[in-house]
Image (cartoon, rainbow, N blue to C red):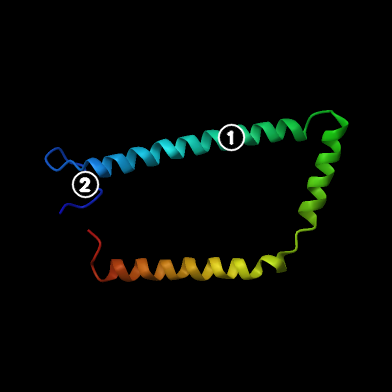
Amino acid sequence: MSHPDAVMLGDFDLFAFYRWLLAIVCGIYTILRLGQTLQTWTGRLWSAHPRSRTLRRYAAVQLLRINVRRFTVDLVQIAVLASGLGILLWLHHRWGFVG
């Protein structure tokens, strides 16, 4: 069985090519949609309309009221899971299971 990332003429894996192509298409789509959304919200927030001024003030107040202590458990959980993944990848690489 060949390595999943190996795309050679003699050993062409259609599924690996499909995954690669799907990742590229989904990544480009995500970047374009995010840019479109940011452009729309920027236009709404920085227009001269009085409601936009109220929306800007509301967004600023909400950002200032964020309580970091409420998210501490979630942030610690993310850090523990990320470090666990890092350790697993390091052990995987150390014991020679990587291509």
Where does residue 51 sit, x and y in percent of width and height?
85, 34
Residue wearing tag 1 = 35
- Lower sequence index among marks 1 and 2: 2
Q: What element carries label 1?
A: helix
Mark linked to residue 45:
none
The quadrant holding residue 15 is: top left
Query: What distance separates the C-alpha of mark 1 from that of mark 2?
Result: 33 Å
Determine whether, in the image, residue 37 is placed left or right of residue 47. Answer: left
* Residue placed furthest toward the right: 50
User: Which residue sits at x=63%, y=70%?
Assistant: 73
Tell me if residue 1 comes above or below residue 9 in the rendering: below
Where does residue 94 sit, x and y in percent of width and height?
28, 70
User: Which residue sits at x=71%, y=34%?
Assistant: 42
Tell me if residue 73 comes above or below residue 14 in the rendering: below
**How would you rate the neighbour count of disc 1 (Cα within 10 Å): few for under 14, some for 14-19, many for 20 or more?**
few
The quadrant holding residue 91 is: bottom left
Residue wearing tag 2 = 6
Tell me if residue 67 comes above or below residue 2 in the rendering: below
Q: Is mark 2 on a helix, strand or loop?
A: loop
Determine whether, in the image, residue 59 is placed left or right of residue 72. Answer: right
Residue type for callout 1: Gly
Where does residue 1 sit, x and y in percent of width and height?
15, 54
Q: How many marks?
A: 2
**How would you rate the neighbour count of disc 2 (Cα within 10 Å): few for under 14, some for 14-19, many for 20 or more?**
few
Residue type for callout 2: Ala
* Residue placed furthest toward the left: 10
Where does residue 43 sit, x and y in percent of width and height?
72, 30
